[in-house]
Image (cartoon, helix red, strand yellow):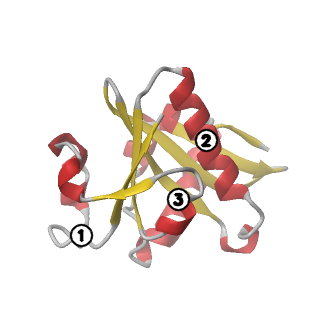
């Protein structure tokens, strides 16, 4: 089941994201950041187990980021990540956003939804606020992608 995240999900979201962050696949998120941005998050759950997460983070009046897409390794390859991203895209359309972007090591995954590779310089400077927290800054090797809604 895909649903909006709830307060009780925060520690499980952090645990899942930290697993990927420790491998260098995404930024880690502090509990404080997660509580502050809880309304951005969707989760995939089965019973009381969190299987995956994704967030729609609004950056500006016509732009948001799909970020923190993560699925537990034992639940991979079941379409959970796709359903989470689809939930973010549906909400973006519902609230009237014009464009979504992502920074990813999995461009083929996001291309399935219509995201297209762009040069990072095409993204507004406001996008890079979180990047300073990354161990790879300023030598980012992620792919920037945009989806026009």
**Separation of marks 1 and 2 at Cα, in angstroms:** 26 Å
Q: Please report the residue visible at 21 percent of the width from the left and 49 percent of the height from the top.
A: 122
Q: Is residue 1 above or below residue 17?
A: above
What kind of element bears circle 1?
loop
What kind of element bears circle 3?
helix
Q: If you read the primary sequence from the N terminus, does the residue marked by circle 1 or circle 2 appear first?
A: 2
Q: Nearer the viewer, mark 1 or mark 2?
A: 1
What kind of element bears circle 2?
strand
**Separation of marks 2 and 3 at Cα, in angstroms:** 20 Å
Q: Please report the residue visible at 39 percent of the width from the left and 37 percent of the height from the top.
A: 64
From the image, tell me which residue sits under label 2.
Answer: 42
From the image, tell me which residue sits under label 3.
Answer: 111
Which residue is the extreme one toward the top?
95
Q: Please report the residue visible at 75 percent of the width from the left and 68 percent of the height from the top.
A: 75
Please tell me in which quadrant of the rendered image residue 27 appears: bottom left
**Label 3: few (<14), some (14–19) or many (≥20) C-alpha neighbours in 10 Å:** some
Question: Which labelled disc corresponds to residue 140?
Answer: 1
Question: Which labelled disc corresponds to residue 112?
Answer: none
Residue 3, x across and y down, in percent: 70, 37
Residue 48, x across and y down, in percent: 80, 50
């Amino acid at each position: 089941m895909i649903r909006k995240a709830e307060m009780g999900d925060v520690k499980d979201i952090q645990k899942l994201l930290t697993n990927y962050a420790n491998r260098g696949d995404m930024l880690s998120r502090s509990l404080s950041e997660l509580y502050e941005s809880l309304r951005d998050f969707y989760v995939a759950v089965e019973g009381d187990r969190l299987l995956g997460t994704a967030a729609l983070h609004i950056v500006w009046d016509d732009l948001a980021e799909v970020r923190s897409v993560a699925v537990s390794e034992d639940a991979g390859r079941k379409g959970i990540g796709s359903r989470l991203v689809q939930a973010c895209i549906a909400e973006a359309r519902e609230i009237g956003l014009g464009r979504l972007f992502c920074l990813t090591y999995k461009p083929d995954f996001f291309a399935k939804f219509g995201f297209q590779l762009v040069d990072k310089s095409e993204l507004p400077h406001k996008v890079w606020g979180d990047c300073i927290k990354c161990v790879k800054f300023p030598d980012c090797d992620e792919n920037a992608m945009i989806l026009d809604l």
